[in-house]
Amino acid sequence: MKKQVIVFLALVVIFGYGCVKTSPEINEEVQEIPEQAEVQEQPPADAKEQAAMVTEAETAGGLQQDFPSNPETKPEPVPEKPQDLIPEIKNTPTEPAAETLSFSWEKDDSPRVVDGSVPFAHGLKDGKVRLYYCNSKGILSAISNDGMAFTKEQGIRISPGTGFETIVCDPTIVDLPDGKIRMYYKGANSQNPGPGQSIHKIYSAISSDGLTFQKEGLRIDSETNGDNGWASVPDAIILPDGRVRIYYVTASGMPHGIGSAVSSDGLNFVKEAGIRVPNLVDPALARISDKYVLFAASIDEGFARVPKGIYYLESSDGLEFGEPTAVFQEDNVYDPSVLNVNGKTVRVFYGKVVPPQLPVVESHTGKIID
């Protein structure tokens, strides 16, 4: 019995030795494992992350760098580059700078409307453009086949009321899924300018034809939501998820600034934290090339960094906007509204008042420069 056990053990040893000898690849991997583990423990974690980031940055830039298989013999340039490249990686914007919009602007001849201002341009399904605007009668409208020559329409779209609708102005429109439209507008208790001198709130009305509106009531109460009595000049858009966001002028935290509120049903709004754009007023927002592009006015002489005029700012999410770029600089202009004519052309309507002349609506047309 002992002899049989000895013979069996001898066969196991011979068989195992033969397997190892006939599989050189496995033998090499087994021999290399201790070396790899030892090499991985040598560099500090931050050095490995820096080397990985350098490799990623160079590969993204089209530089294919072959590192030796032995980590102990890394090429000399690697430890020299991370300090220069890491800040660039961390500071790389979500959208490349090359994608920033650039326009070629030209002022359009003659006013769009005389004896009216504070415009909102609404593109209709038949290709026409209806321009809502304000004067002492309330909110009125004019119609155009080409967005340039407008004919005033009879009647008043929104008439003044009482209390905080003693003054009504600043219309903005959203299209509803059932074919109706909803207008949001500013209501004020007096014409006194500026926060602290009058109270502005935002209301809504609904219409089936864009001409006859039924008032729906208060949407944003500036006295209770932190706007310090001043929620004015609304501009509404429908977000990709179906919610409605209203950008508006707020007195929250500063004399001039643009805030926002959002609603899931278009009626009940919740104020969003923070300021979308400081110091500028009269927002008008459009989606252009997958960007949120907000047009606004600079009216404050004390804000010397941005002279009076009409500007636009870009955002990828509709909340954080970049620096303003001028459409044009001029005194006595305000309340822009933007019409996306097509994928490459936009038209910005705005009010202008130079007393003793009547207020007018003028426009600039911009073409996107590729």
Image: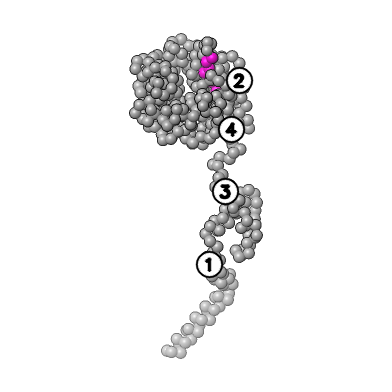
Real-space CA distance between mark 2 and mark 1, rounded to the nearest whole angstrom: 70 Å
Image height of 55 relative to 34, above or below: above
SS category of the residue bearing label 1: helix
Sequence-first tag of 2 and 4: 4
Q: What quarter of the picture does the C terminus occupy?
A: top right
Under mark 3, the amino acid is Pro
Left or right position of 58 against 296:
right
Marker disc for residue 65: none
Under mark 2, the amino acid is Lys
The residue wearing badge 3 is: 87
Real-space CA distance between mark 4 and mark 1, rounded to the nearest whole angstrom: 51 Å
Q: Nearer the viewer, mark 1 or mark 3?
A: 3
Pinpoint residue 245: horizontal percent, then vertical percent: 43, 30
SS category of the residue bearing label 2: strand
The residue wearing badge 1 is: 37
The residue segment tinted magenta is 348-354
Real-space CA distance between mark 3 and mark 4, rounded to the nearest whole angstrom: 25 Å
Residue at 52% from the left image edge and 65% from the top image edge: 41
Under mark 4, the amino acid is Leu
Q: Quadrant of residue 191?
A: top left
Pinpoint residue 5: horizontal percent, then vertical percent: 45, 86
The residue wearing badge 4 is: 101
- Asked if residue 293 lies in the magenta stretch, the reply is no
Real-space CA distance between mark 2 and mark 4, rounded to the nearest whole angstrom: 19 Å
Q: Nearer the viewer, mark 2 or mark 1?
A: 2
Pointers 4 and 1 in contact (C-beta within 8 Å) = no
Residue at 43% from the left image edge and 22% from the top image edge: 194
